[in-house]
Image (cartoon, rainbow, N blue to C red):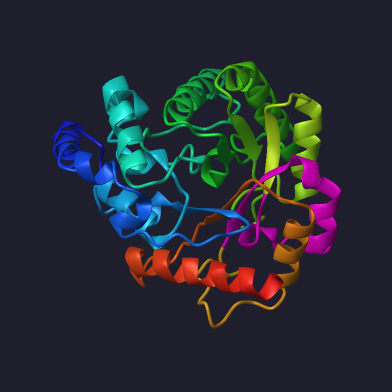
Amino acid sequence: MNHYNRRDFIRTSAIAAGSVVIAGLPAACRGKKETKKFFKYAFCNEIIKEFSWPEQCDIVGKAGYEGIEVAPFTLVKEGVDEISQSMRQQMVRDMKNAGIVCPGLHWLFVAPPQGLHFTTPDDQLRQRSVDYLVKLIDFCGDLGGEIMVFGSPAQRGSSGGISVMDATNYFAEGLAKVADHAKERNVLILVEPLPKKDTDVVNTLEEAMKVVNKINHPNIATMFDFHNSVDETEPWSGLIQKYFRYIHHVHVQNMDGSLIMSDKIPQDFIPIFELLKKLDFKKWVSVEVFDFSPGGKFIAEESMKTFLEIERLIN
């Protein structure tokens, strides 16, 4: 795992210092081919977590993305407290040097830190988890991020003998506690529907919207993920039209979680991108795959080819 510790920070600073002249050049001079696109595309950094942070930024920028979505666990040994303000500022400079920004965070509660659980009946543990979410909001804000995708199935299911309803209520209570702070940092927390095989708390967009509506705060919303839609009973197009104003992010991958090859785009995906374009979706569209075996650089490059092919097909 690539931790953003002091050793890596020193290495990062050296790389960044050597990139000052390069960073001042137009993107085209840095080898990044600019292509006019309708959607804003991001790439999830855990796919390339074996690289240093500046290398990750460079890979994502050169592949043609506008943003790098961050999984905090890939950068730390114990928690985001390790990443000082000066380190965060350097991370922002690294992104700027690569011509990209940070859309936000996902995989919020994957260890480290160990043992967090957002919907446990253990009051102290639940509060500790809420407190860490506040730290993640600050980390996201410091990176310039706009959204935080709350998936993390292992840390949000019913446990300790409580019902799904009780766990879902704890989920809403915890999010309500941090909503005002998220607003202060200009961050949206997005309730991500996840498959029943992964968690029993919030499996559909309708259930996500029940949580969103219960909290009733402008900084709590939801998102759409192709892979996680297996328990939906309504067509994707209907869901997106019904909840469009609350959908602030889209994750893209094959239904089995693998890379979508540019010459094997699922045909039922195309109308969804047509619909998003028709509805003038200006939020982020991000690659999140779960099979890293093709290699991070290849996944980044091939996924961008896929996005460009989709754009060609819907124009």
- Place of residue 234 in the rendered image (x, y in percent of width and height, measured from the top left): 84, 61
The residues colored magenta run 224-252
- Left or right: where does residue 42 sit relative to residue 8? right
The quadrant of the image that shows the C terminus is bottom right
- Left or right: where does residue 96 sit relative to residue 10? right
* Residue at 38% from the left image edge and 65% from the top image edge: 292
- Up-down: is 274 above or below 178? below
- Up-down: is 275 above or below 17? below
- Place of residue 15 in the rendered image (x, y in percent of width and height, measured from the top left): 17, 42
* Residue at 54% from the left image edge and 83% from the top image edge: 263
- Left or right: where does residue 256 sit relative to residue 203? left
Instruction: Look at the image and tell me whether residue 291 can be seen.
Output: yes
* Residue at 26% from the left image edge and 54% from the top image edge: 50
Instruction: Look at the image and tell me whether residue 201 can be seen.
Output: no
| Quarter occupied by residue 227 | bottom right
- Up-down: is 40 above or below 9? below
| Quarter occupied by residue 83 | top left
- Left or right: where does residue 291 sit relative to residue 202? left
Q: Is residue 235 magenta?
A: yes
Q: Nearer the viewer, residue 27 or 239?
A: 27
- Up-down: is 216 above or below 5? above
* Residue at 15% from the left image edge and 42% from the top image edge: 18
- Place of residue 188 in the rendered image (x, y in percent of width and height, measured from the top left): 62, 31
- Place of residue 55 in the rendered image (x, y in percent of width and height, measured from the top left): 26, 51
